[in-house]
Amino acid sequence: MLTTCLAMLETEADRQKFTRLYEALEKKVYAVALRVLGNPEQAEDAAQQAWLRLIQKWELVSALSREKAGGYAITAAKNAALDMLRAQSHTVPLPEDWDPPAQQDGQDDYSYLVSLVRELPEGYRRVLELKLVEELGNREIAKRLSIRESTVSSRVMRGRAMLQKRLQEEGFRHA
């Protein structure tokens, strides 16, 4: 993670200052995220997000005292972890045994599902097309649509929930 962050900084002085901050707070940032999430893998992801947020605001952060920059890093970790929790709370899982109909297996079902996707609001429709049809990851979708990765995640979850609701309203049952 440190190498990635350093590559994003322009001057050697900034890289040295960031390295000192990172080395002093790496464990603390992770610990804050772990305390919020309770899951080591998710805490690592949240900590990485916090460091990336710091880099994005480096001009502001680098002007702060070391103590205030440390507080900013801890707050960024807490907020990244809370963002992950919020994203999880909006998750609407599809049934485990549900498998979208393949085109050759059930042309009518497939066509119907495609028509439902096309009826979704534009933002949800485009994200689901990229996710389900083109099988892109959230990061790539975010880049293509110039939106945040967290926005992609929430649109995928909400779009799937809209589809699931419509399918249930129409009496469509999975096999």
Image (cartoon, rainbow, N blue to C red):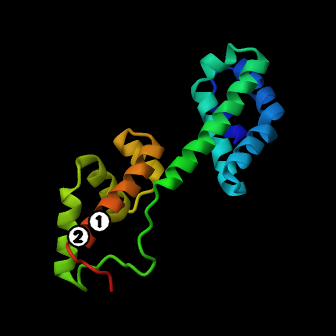
Say whether residue 51 is visible: no
Residue kind at label 1, given as amino acid type: Lys
Instruction: Say which residue appears at 47% left-offset and 45% top-offset.
Output: 150
Q: Which residue in the rendered view is the most extreme toward the right?
A: 24
**Helix, strand or loop under label 1:** helix
Seen from the viewer's position, the closer of residues 116 and 58 is 116
Q: x, y percentage for residue 49?
A: 61, 41
**Helix, strand or loop under label 2:** helix
Q: x, y percentage for residue 99?
A: 37, 78
Q: x, y percentage for residue 117?
A: 23, 61
Instruction: Say which residue appears at 73% left-offset and 49% top-offset.
Output: 34
The mark found on residue 144 in the picture is none
Label 1 crowd (10 A; few <14 / some 14-19 / many >=20): few
Q: In this view, does 22 lie above or below 40?
A: above
Q: x, y percentage for residue 42?
A: 65, 53
Seen from the viewer's position, the closer of residues 44 and 3 is 44
| Quadrant the C terminus occupies | bottom left
Real-space Cα separation, disc 1 to disc 2, in angstroms: 6 Å
Instruction: Say which residue appears at 63% left-offset and 29% top-offset.
Output: 54
Q: In this view, does 16 lie above or below 170?
A: above
- Residue identified by numbered label 2: 169
Label 2 crowd (10 A; few <14 / some 14-19 / many >=20): few
Instruction: Say which residue appears at 35% left-offset and 61% top-offset.
Output: 161
| Quadrant the N terminus occupies | top right
Residue 15 appears in which quarter of the rendering? top right
- Residue identified by numbered label 1: 165
Question: Mark 1 touching mark 2, by CB under 8 A?
Answer: yes
Instruction: Tell whether 163 sits left or right of 141.
Output: left
Residue kind at label 2, given as amino acid type: Glu
